[in-house]
Image: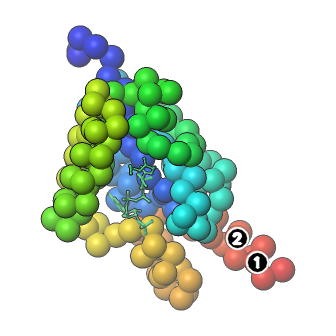
């Protein structure tokens, strides 16, 4: 039992959440007292799923993890972390190519808020190639992507495609 309560944030756009993200969230949930999945509005990325849809999917997908909650945020990550009293930011590292960028972002976040530590979790070797845009790319071309996401994400894509074509 830690002497202080450690609340961590795992941020991302999660457009959509993949099994790679779930793997990182599951492992982080065992390391910290509370884990908040911070779903970034991130309008610059022009997400395919709305913020509400991404939050709802993440809540459902991670509903079996009792110490995990899902919240949307807009603006700076460190400001959101301060709002929710989080002292740790969790980032998943898939490959060495993620490292340089992640270290840079961690340094920026430390500069902005020195009291918040960034902790890296090595993502599963099975999914080092995986990203949300890879999932969207395969889906948009009618390829098989179900193994990369929770079944409810497959349903969400189907519903959205039906709505687009009607
Ligand atoms: N499994 C599968 N995919 C993964 C992954 C994993 N373990 N880890 C990362 N990815 C994917 C992400 O889905 C994302 O895919 P995409 O580009 O196809 O959407 C890609 O790898 C890059 O990941 P990441 O850098 O985490 O991007 P993101 O868009 O998911 O999240 C934020 C970025 C939201 C954390 C970041 O933009 C942020 O903090 N924004 C707020 C503003 C701010 O404070 N910026 C920092 C200071 S300048």
Tell me whether circle 1 and circle 2 mark residues in contact (CB < 8 Å). Answer: yes
Mark 2 crowd level (few <14, some 14–19, many ≥20, 10 Å Cα):
few
Residue 73 percent coordinates (x, y): 55, 43
Mark 1 crowd level (few <14, some 14–19, many ≥20, 10 Å Cα):
few
Foreground residue, 92 or 82? 82
Q: Quadrant of ligand 1?
A: bottom left
Query: Outermost residue toward the top?
Result: 3
Picture disc at residue 164? 1
Left or right of 129, for residue 164: right
Foreground residue, 87 or 145? 87
Residue 112 percent coordinates (x, y): 34, 37
Q: Looking at the rendering, which quadrant does residue 100 occupy?
A: bottom left
Residue drawn at (48%, 27%), measured in percent from left and top? 84
Residue drawn at (57%, 52%), measured in percent from left and top? 41
Relative to 84, residue 146 above or below: below
Q: Which residue position is annotated with label 2? A: 160
Would residue 157 be visible to someone looking at this image?
yes
Identify the colour scheme used: rainbow
Q: In which quarter of the image is the C terminus?
A: bottom right
At mark 2, the secondary structure is helix
Would residue 150 be visible to someone looking at this image?
no
The Cα atoms of the two marked residues, 1 and 2, are separated by 6 Å
Query: Outermost residue toward the right?
Result: 166
Relative to 61, residue 19 above or below: below
At mark 1, the secondary structure is helix
Foreground residue, 67 or 83? 83
Residue 127 percent coordinates (x, y): 28, 66
Left or right of 98, for residue 151: right
Relative to 162, residue 35 above or below: above
Residue drawn at (63%, 53%), measured in percent from left and top? 51
Left or right of 163, for residue 95: left
Residue 119 percent coordinates (x, y): 23, 40
């Amino acid at each position: 039992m830690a002497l202080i309560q450690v609340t961590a944030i795992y941020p991302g756009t999660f457009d959509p959440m993949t099994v790679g993200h779930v793997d990182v969230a599951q492992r982080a949930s065992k390391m910290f007292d509370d884990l908040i999945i911070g779903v970034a509005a991130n309008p610059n990325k022009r997400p395919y799923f709305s913020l509400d849809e991404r939050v709802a999917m993440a809540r459902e997908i991670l509903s079996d993890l009792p110490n995990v909650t899902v919240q949307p945020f807009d603006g700076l990550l460190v400001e959101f972390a301060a709002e929710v009293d989080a002292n740790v930011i969790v980032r998943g590292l898939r490959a060495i190519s993620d490292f340089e960028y992640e270290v840079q972002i961690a340094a920026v976040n430390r500069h902005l808020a020195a009291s918040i530590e960034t902790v890296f979790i090595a993502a599963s070797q099975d999914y080092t190639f995986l990203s949300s845009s890879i999932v969207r790319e395969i889906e948009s071309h009618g390829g098989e992507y179900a193994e990369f996401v929770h079944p409810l994400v497959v349903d969400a894509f189907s519903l959205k495609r039906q709505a687009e074509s009607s």
